[in-house]
Amino acid sequence: MKKRIPSLMFPLVHALPEASPVPHAASAPSATTSESSKGIKEMDGGGEVERADSRTDKKAESEKETFSNEPKYAAVDVNTADTSAFIALPGIGNKLALRIVNFRDKLCGFYSIDQIGETYGLPDSVFRKIKPFLRFETNLVKKFNINTATKEEMKSHPYLKWNLANAIVEYRNQHGAFSSLEDLKKISLITTDIFDKVKFYLAL
């Protein structure tokens, strides 16, 4: 009688479920890439600064060159200069130079550079242009003795003219000799402003 060999029993092998894909995190930019970008930005920024500095330097050089190309004028002593010296200044022609000198002669000399600005026909803009080249180095002011000068002598002065010359002499005739220049203020025609201008040309 044949023996029955028991059949081998193999366990069933169950298929494993496929693993679901793991979501990947957003990849962060690498340190190398970040540093490179930063380097590029820094280079660009530096380039802008260099270009700005270059423009500034060129502008400064241009201004310096323009200034150096400006004509230079010799200094002029307002009380000794002749017409040719004034003509050499910017904006001054023959006519204005002659007027300045004539005005100086009538005044009997300038006591201030600003008096040139009073010259008839001299534009204020031209006076401001030439003022830096004017010098007051020689005092040649001539003065009238208010106790002895005549009307005729004083009337030719631009600051006195006939009205003040006559008033001074008439006051002197009525009140006697002046004891000080301040006595002139007692004359109604001589205001403080007028006195401050004429006192440089008057003496006792």
Image (cartoon, helix red, strand yellow):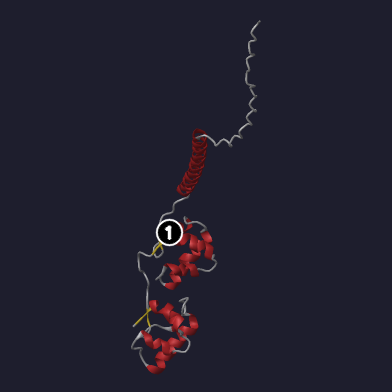
* Residue 96: x %, y % from top left: 52, 62
Residue 97 appears in the figure: no
Total numbered labels placed on residues in the image? 1
Point 49% across, 82% down: residue: 162
Residue 117 appears in the figure: yes
* Residue 107: x %, y % from top left: 44, 72
Q: State the quadrant of the C terminus.
A: bottom left
Q: Secondary structure at mark 1?
A: helix
The quarter of the displayed image where residue 6 is located: top right
Q: Is residue 6 above or below residue 32?
A: above
Q: Is residue 154 above or below residue 53?
A: below
Q: Residues within 10 Å of mark 1 (few under 14, many from 20)?
A: some
Q: Residue furthest bottom?
A: 174
Q: Is residue 10 left or right of residue 33?
A: right
Which residue is more in the foreground, 130 or 30? Answer: 30
* Residue 28: x %, y % from top left: 55, 37
Q: Is residue 14 left or right of residue 35?
A: right
Point 40% across, 57% down: residue: 75
* Residue 41: x %, y % from top left: 52, 39
Q: State the quadrant of the N terminus.
A: top right
Residue under circle 1? Answer: 133
Q: Is residue 199 above or below residue 68?
A: below
Which residue is more in the foreground, 51 or 133? Answer: 51
Q: Is residue 202 above or below residue 4?
A: below
Q: Amino acid at mark 1?
A: Phe
Q: Residue furthest front?
A: 1
Which residue is more in the foreground, 38 or 33? Answer: 33
